[in-house]
Image: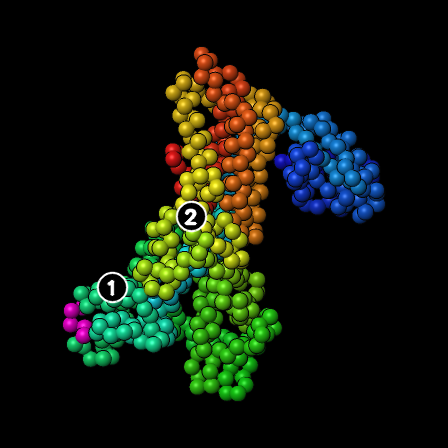
């Protein structure tokens, strides 16, 4: 609202001075200054457009300051430096933020940046050969949060899990199950860990005569039942973690349906593949790959990337306008390959977006935690949840940028102190919920926001908290645009900090009063708005907002 007011005022000023208004940006940037002494908000609009308009930046800033001063909601405007505008809002204007939060409730923070955009968000997609390790667990948390953030900006998001049930790794998994069933050690290239023995036993229980079957038939039985059991376990673990998918897409279906063969023919006609050394190659170097990639081998068999091409074509045929792939740290090469695949299919490479996640390291007592009780070689989703719980696990995995490695201190995120970020935020919500209960027990009703005199919220800490709440829509918008849900987590910590400072400086409840004062009612409304924003933010992260702790 403030940005719109500043732009409209700039249009008036430039028109009055007979200057070109087309130099103004469609959206004016208005930000909170780092130093609160510089005002509530600041904009560099004058510096941004003055040269194009043919006027001195500070002179333009002075004109804008004079025009803005006295406008509805503006208390004062100062010109700083070469042409910055520092704005201070009137108390009743700041109160409008509280009113908007409470009025919009669970919808506050939502926007329409991606209104109606059909997005396919593929994440986790761990091979069904073992429990989900920490890398996959990070994507389960971040991917789900990203889906929520995109949905909050109007996108129609389909969460998809690419079920890799074809290829050599499945064969190694099956041979490991059969070895365990025989009481033999795992093959040299196979999988270890107690879970292999558990699943092998479950296969025998489901098919008692499996070990007497001919070798080929036995292999197929262990594959069919074992892979199904492993994947059921993966899905259950993800569900318990708060992450569910709309589509589980089977890689094998691309081959059995003829989709791979169909996409290969489409590639040959596109001009983005060429024939050399008896094979067909994708021109992926044109999109930043270090070398072109074989899609059809010299023996006529499709290479692994052929399945990726067919999968992308399938997504586009299902009507998805943006296909986001969330891949592990060792998949950087896929960025160029998938964009090249899109171009080779005659599509715009921008429909493909690849996000690369980095490693997660667990630390306890200052030392790395490396071994899983069940998987034997890696720490799994279940290990992390067992150690710290779902909320702490999700929050700690989301709160750092996914493209950087992160160390998670299990001792820290297990603490029930303000040192623990998730506790700090959740405790603020619980404290706010308790405050409202205490008000009721004292016979104090906060009434409705329309009846509250929010212009009474003039204390410095009240202003800091209100302006922080006003940032939430921008934060959600940025988190969606940049694909960075960690921005929401860090913002919530700012809200919790602003609230605790407000609570320490401004008494909310007056137990000795027979009736609540107008200031008490206004502060209760501010507290409710704060609770609502924290609840909305935690909801975007898939983390609970407890009412008591």
Mark 1 or mark 2, earlier in chain: 1
Q: Residue furthest bottom?
A: 277
Residue 11 picture location, percent across and down: 74, 38
Q: Is residue 523 left or right of residue 209?
A: right
| SS for dot 1 | helix
The magenta span reads: 207-211
Q: Which residue is mark 1?
A: 198
Q: Which residue is mark 2?
A: 411
Say which of 170 and 495 sits in front.
495
Residue 222 picture location, percent across and down: 25, 71
Q: Which residue: 55% across, 26% down?
A: 505
Residue 403 picture location, percent across and down: 53, 58
Say which of 7 and 45 sits in front.
45
Say which of 370 and 503 sits in front.
370
Q: Which mark identifies residue 335?
A: none
Q: Residue furthest top?
A: 514
| SS for dot 2 | helix
Q: Which residue: 52% across, 77% down?
A: 293
Q: Is residue 284 visible?
A: yes
Q: Which residue: 71% across, 28% down?
A: 76
């Amino acid at each position: 609202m403030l940005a719109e007011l500043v732009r409209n005022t700039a249009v008036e000023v430039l028109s009055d001075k007979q200057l070109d208004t087309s130099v103004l940006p469609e959206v004016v940037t208005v930000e909170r200054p780092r130093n609160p002494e510089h005002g509530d908000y600041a904009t560099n609009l004058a510096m941004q457009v003055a040269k194009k308009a043919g006027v001195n930046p500070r002179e333009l800033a002075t004109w804008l300051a004079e025009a803005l001063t006295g406008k509805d909601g503006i208390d004062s405007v100062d010109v700083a430096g070469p042409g910055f505008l520092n704005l201070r809002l009137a108390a009743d204007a700041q109160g409008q933020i509280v009113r908007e939060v409470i009025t919009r409730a669970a919808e506050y923070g939502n926007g329409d940046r991606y209104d109606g955009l059909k997005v396919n968000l593929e994440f986790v997609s761990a091979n069904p050969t073992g429990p989900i390790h920490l890398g996959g667990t990070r994507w389960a948390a971040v991917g789900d949060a990203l889906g929520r953030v995109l949905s909050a900006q109007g996108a129609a998001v389909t969460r998809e899990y690419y079920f890799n049930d074809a290829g050599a790794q499945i064969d190694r998994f099956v041979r490991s199950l059969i070895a365990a069933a025989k009481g033999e050690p795992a093959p040299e290239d196979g999988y270890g860990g107690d879970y292999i023995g558990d699943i092998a036993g479950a296969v025998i229980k489901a098919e008692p005569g499996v070990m007497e079957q001919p070798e080929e038939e036995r292999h197929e039985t262990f594959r069919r039942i074992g892979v199904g059991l492993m994947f059921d376990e993966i899905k259950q673990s993800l569900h318990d973690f708060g992450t569910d998918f709309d589509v589980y897409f089977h890689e094998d279906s691309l081959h059995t349906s003829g989709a791979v063969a169909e996409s290969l023919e489409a590639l040959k006609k596109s001009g983005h593949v060429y024939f050399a050394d008896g094979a067909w190659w994708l021109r992926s170097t044109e999109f930043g790959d270090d070398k072109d990639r074989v899609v059809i081998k010299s023996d006529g068999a499709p290479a692994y990337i052929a399945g990726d091409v067919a999968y992308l074509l399938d997504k586009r045929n299902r009507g998805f306008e943006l296909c986001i792939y969330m891949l592990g740290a060792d998949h950087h090469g896929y960025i160029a390959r998938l964009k090249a695949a899109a171009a080779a299919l005659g599509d715009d490479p921008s429909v493909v977006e690849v996000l690369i996640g980095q490693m997660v390291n667990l630390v306890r007592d200052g030392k790395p935690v490396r071994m899983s009780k069940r998987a034997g070689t890696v720490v799994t989703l279940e290990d992390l949840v067992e150690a710290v719980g779902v909320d702490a696990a999700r929050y700690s995995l989301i709160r750092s940028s996914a493209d950087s490695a992160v160390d998670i201190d299990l001792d820290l995120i297990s603490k029930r102190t303000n040192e623990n970020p998730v506790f700090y935020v959740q405790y603020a919500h619980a404290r706010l919920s308790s405050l409202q209960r205490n008000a009721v027990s004292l016979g104090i009703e906060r009434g409705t926001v329309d009846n509250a005199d929010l212009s009474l919220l003039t204390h410095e800490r009240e202003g800091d908290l209100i302006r922080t709440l006003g940032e939430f829509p921008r934060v959600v918008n940025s988190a969606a645009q940049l694909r960075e849900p960690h921005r929401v987590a860090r913002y919530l910590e700012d809200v919790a900090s602003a609230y605790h400072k407000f609570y320490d400086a401004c008494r909310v409840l007056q137990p000795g009063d027979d009736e609540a004062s107008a200031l008490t009612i206004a502060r209760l409304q501010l507290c409710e708005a704060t609770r609502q924003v924290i609840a909305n933010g935690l909801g975007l992260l898939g983390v609970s907002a407890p009412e008591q702790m």
